[in-house]
Amino acid sequence: MLNEYLRDQDGVITLDQARAAGLSQYAVQRRLGTGQWQRCARGVYFVADRPFTDGARVRAAVWGYGQQAVASGLAAAWWLGLTRFAPDVVDVTMPRSGHGRCHEGSRLRRRDLDPTDIVTVRSLRVTAPALTVLEAAIRRPGGVKILDRALQKDIELRELWRAQLRNKGRYGSPAARRLLQAASDGAHSEAERLLAKMLRGADITGWRTNYPVAGYKVDFAFPAAKVAIETDGLAFHSSSDDFHHDRVRQNDLTLLGWQVLRFTWLDLNEYPQRVIAIIRHAISVREQAIRAG
């Protein structure tokens, strides 16, 4: 049983688990005294016969705050496989009634979580995917990529809104709400959300998102002017098959009388005024041509 704990828990074990495996307090102290085990926090130990991995570091940081502690923010995102790299500082959430000071290498927030917002993954309590996505998206520059991928793959927008409403008073809640409001336009990539914001800010109207045209859905469409806008988001199509499909789609739309504009993430971030000017010009020219024709 002891070996199973150590194998499944990155070499980290709590005092309660050690006792459940049949070790006495003396046996634990003896292992600490000989250097077989190392103390990570009160009642949390690491077996020193293996590397201290990121998994061990995150697990020990969370368990150091007791049984009610939960990995959150970027630590939870990494644990759930939503990000590639573990954060240097482990975000931990514990109930307001919990005791103890913040430990080195971790960032502690005290708030009471709804049971819906807690899951146990590989024996570690972490914030559930929807809340994790919201918190991680505002934790660092580029963190919004986590939200993009979640919307495009596994999590529906309504799940994110429910998590947002259950946790309205938390740190970063206003920023997360703004992202959700932008996503509610129907634009599922950050590039689309940014362009939607730019169009509203420029008082350009008459556009629709995810507009159906001849069996396709274009990111943005001005139906009256027959102008279609396609955007490449943060994780845009990169395979040769996707590239080919995009070009076939663009050609089909052109043959149906649509003008297709395409903007990259760099265009939208670095040259927003140019993008708006091109869109205005395209709409104007097309409307004049339609009236004349």
Image (cartoon, rainbow, N blue to C red):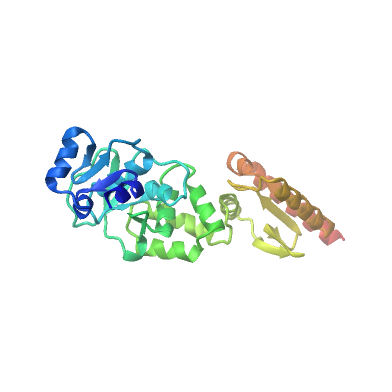
Q: Position of residue 183 (x, y in %)?
A: 53, 58
Residue 288 visible here: no
- The reply, left or right, for residue 293 in relation to residue 71 is right
Q: Nearer the viewer, residue 202 or 135?
A: 135
Q: Nearer the viewer, residue 45 or 212?
A: 45
* Residue under the image location 42 percent in, 65 percent down: 162
Q: Position of residue 59 (x, y in %)?
A: 32, 46
Q: Quadrant of residue 61?
A: top left
* Residue under the image location 52 percent in, 59 percent down: 154
Q: Nearer the viewer, residue 26 or 275?
A: 26
Residue 203 visible here: yes
Q: Nearer the viewer, residue 78 or 173?
A: 78
Q: Position of residue 148 (x, y in %)?
A: 53, 52
Label tally: 0
Q: Quadrant of residue 55?
A: top left
Q: Position of residue 152 (x, y in %)?
A: 56, 57
- The reply, left or right, for residue 89 in relation to residue 85 is left
Up-down relation of residue 105 to residue 261 (above or below): above
* Residue under the image location 74 percent in, 52 percent down: 245
- The reply, left or right, for residue 40 in relation to residue 115 is left
